[in-house]
Amino acid sequence: MEYCWNLLNVLAFWELTQMPSSYCLVRHKLPVLWIMPLSGDSGKGNITAEVLPAVELALHHLSEQPAPLGNYELQFHLTDSECDNGKALKAFFDTIFNGPKPVMIFGGVCSSVTSILAQSLESWNLVQLSFAVTAPSLANKRFPNFFRTVPSDSAVNVALVRFLRQYGWSRVGTLTQREQRFTEVQGDLSKHLEAANIQLAEAESFSEAPCDCVKKLKDNDVRIVIAHFDVSLAARVFCCVYNLSMYGQKYQWILPGWTQAIWWTDTEPINCTAENILTVIEGSISADIETLSTRNIRGTSGRTPQEYEKEYDERRQLKRLGASKFHGFAYDGTWVIAKVLTRVMETVRYRERYSIHRNFTVTEQEVGQMVLEAMDKINFFGVTGHVMFQKGERMANVKFAQYQDGRVVDIEKYSAITDELEFISPIRFQRDKPTKDRTHVYPYRKRISIFLYGIVAFLTFLGIFTSCSFLVFSVKHRNHWAISMSRPFMNSLIILGAVLSYCSIFFMGLDGSYVSDRVFEVSCSVQISCLSIGCTAAFGAMFAKTWTIHSFFKNHSMEKKATKDYGPVLLLMFLLLIDLSLVICLQILDPLRRRLKEYHIEADPHGQDFFIQPFSERCENTYMGFWMAAIYVYKGILLLSTCFLAWTTRQTNIPAVNDSRSIRFSVFVSVPVILIGTCASMLWQDQPNVQFCIVTLVIITCCCSTLCMVFIPKIIIIRMGTDPAFLSRRFHLIQWHSELEKKLGQDKDKRNIMEENDPGASGCVTDMAQNIFSSLDNLLSENLHLKRHIIELNSELEDLTRQLNELSPHVIENVIVRSFVHKAVKKKCLTLPESSHCNRNLLEDINSPEHIQRRLSLQLPILHHAYLPSIGGVDSSPLSSPFESPQQMPMPRTYGVLVTGL
């Protein structure tokens, strides 16, 4: 074979192939094809030359072994692959066809060349053993005849996952260089992380500019970073890390196994110094396969790993060669081939010797199968540790080291056989605690202050007690006119609505820290139901009473009957039915559920490495906006209508008749408070304590003001003992002058009489107003009757005067006195309702001459002058028609004279 070998490789190969003749005479030669690149890459050394002393040492140690190993000699035929696929295949086929045909193939450094050869091994019944190929892609079912003593790069991933779990890291990120050997490792690591339930938060890859990827890792809050890149880019990567301050106690970097080299001294292409790089990598951890075992155990060669390393260093130093990290795997690989082929050869010789067939031969296929079986059974302790294979892969050890004070310190070792981490030396963390794998965000419930809830609960209990006291007072004095004529049923509904509104406060302060989720959802439904129905009951009752007063004074005439008693009740029941329908539909179609509202994340106020995630619990459903809009619109219409009716009845001032003033004042106080409170609660919804305080203050203010304005005046009236007659005389009726003038101008028969309530009254005016107008009709009829009677008396007086002028004075006096008095007393007695009980004897005594004589001088002038309108008497002008209705007669401007008689 004609290849361009350098002088060093030629000499090394000559030493390997030119064994002493004594070996060839006594040992069976086993040809093995050794495919390696004989020239090294610049800066990386020559792997073949550097591992050659280890192979020589292994052959030397094998020659010292007794039978059966001593009976066989490995004869390596070195072929230069030049890391070229075509040349490697040509050299392989030349060896196969030109002979001697190899029993096994040893070596392989370049993964592309090795993968091509490994695909064709099964057809040639050959097995390949590599000691330098670490590409994860070769750990595949497509290469059943491929084995390697060096662990795959992906073998580190299993140990890495075990290491992450030991320190509780469940969230990591990766920074990978875009090369096949690195991307394959990162892909395999992703599978192991997923199987171990470790979150891969961010996977960044770069070619030459790693700064953007590093920034993305920081922006995504990646604290544990697993790096896969070449040592030539390490300085550039960590310069970006230094500039972004992505190091220190908050971050943990896990690097590949090239950290043993002093790579940070070359900082020419970057703007960071070596000190900056050392600052960044301080505390970083490296994970790499164990090239030589640290155990002081004599292996199958009879030497400890330390003794072997000493002999190897002596050999390579004589040849002035560098140390390769694969030399131990090449040494153990040589022993693997020797043990496997020895076992196969012994098996073949045994079969040939004891076979029943004379000409028994073993085919190449059977030899290849026996080699595979022997490889799977390999198990011995070599210089790199236990040597055994699982599906062609070496069960290796992984070593973890850490930069501590500028030097590399071994901290732990992972054994793939036992799946355990072995402690070597303590790992250092800047805060004596493992670095956190993320910025921990601790949830913080924005709850209602227990102190604030206690104060509000006390005020609520006080409000409920006051409401119940008003109810007891109303029931106790239900027969008093101040209670009975102000609709006690409506007053009871106002109290009930206030109590329900008060009760809703207790459910507003509950959250998940006091009750379970299910109880919280039930409290949401109870809360909105109590508040909605309570508001409608209280303000609906006031609306019904105000509407009754308004409609009464707007439409009432003297001939029209008062509003029916069940009208306001039906109106209130209709309002409650609407409210109840809304609540039922809400609970059935879209029930309220517990929802968490999260706020902006806040840093720890004490500067610790964690954040706070404030949240609060709310009662919400799918279409919360629609339902709230419906409830607000309905309640708003009810409140505004009550406000409007209270404003239109502001001129009424009959305390003994209605509650318009109390209702007006309570509505004018409640509506602005509700509007302002609703807007304020929306603005402060991020502060549960403030929002709870605002809402409860609105409820307590509205309920307390309404109850006090309605019931306290009644309590004052009952305690002062004021009767309705006194109030009627004190507070006269006041008309709406503008409307009355207009109505009197159109129709003089229509009268609009308005009455104003006492500031403390809270009832309907129906009963009292009906009594007033009934008394008014009676008085008008009596007045008409008296006027007619006056006309008759005037006619009789004129007749008597004319007759008196014709008689003598003495006779005239007796006749006038006797006849006038007798007739006047008789008719007066007959006109009285008690005329049937008049005593006739009494009349005779009254008409006696003595009594008449005694009173005539006084009574006659008084009677005569009383009928004269010119001096203040009643007008005696005759009616235009004796059947004229009293409603058609002119009415005085005020009715004070009539009301005082009630």
Image: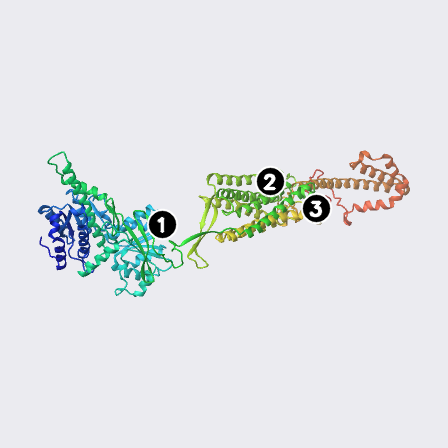
Point out which mark residue 165 bears. 1
Among numbered discs 1 and 2, the one appearing first in the sequence: 1
Residue at image point 47% right, 41% down: 591
Give me the C-alpha separation between circle 3 and circle 1: 81 Å
Name the residue beneath numbered marker 3: 718
Question: Residue 218 lies in what quarter of the image?
Answer: bottom left
What colour-coding does the image apply?
rainbow
Name the residue beneath numbered marker 2: 568
Q: What element carries label 2?
A: helix
Q: Position of residue 26 (x, y in %)?
A: 12, 48
Which residue is more in the foreground, 729 or 538? 538
Whether residue 341 sits left or right of residue 304 in the image: it is: left
Q: Is mark 3 on a helix, strand or loop?
A: helix
Q: Where is residue 315 in the image (x, y as percent from the top left)?
A: 19, 58
What amino acid is found at the position of numbered circle 1 in the picture?
Arg
Among numbered discs 2 and 3, the one appearing first in the sequence: 2
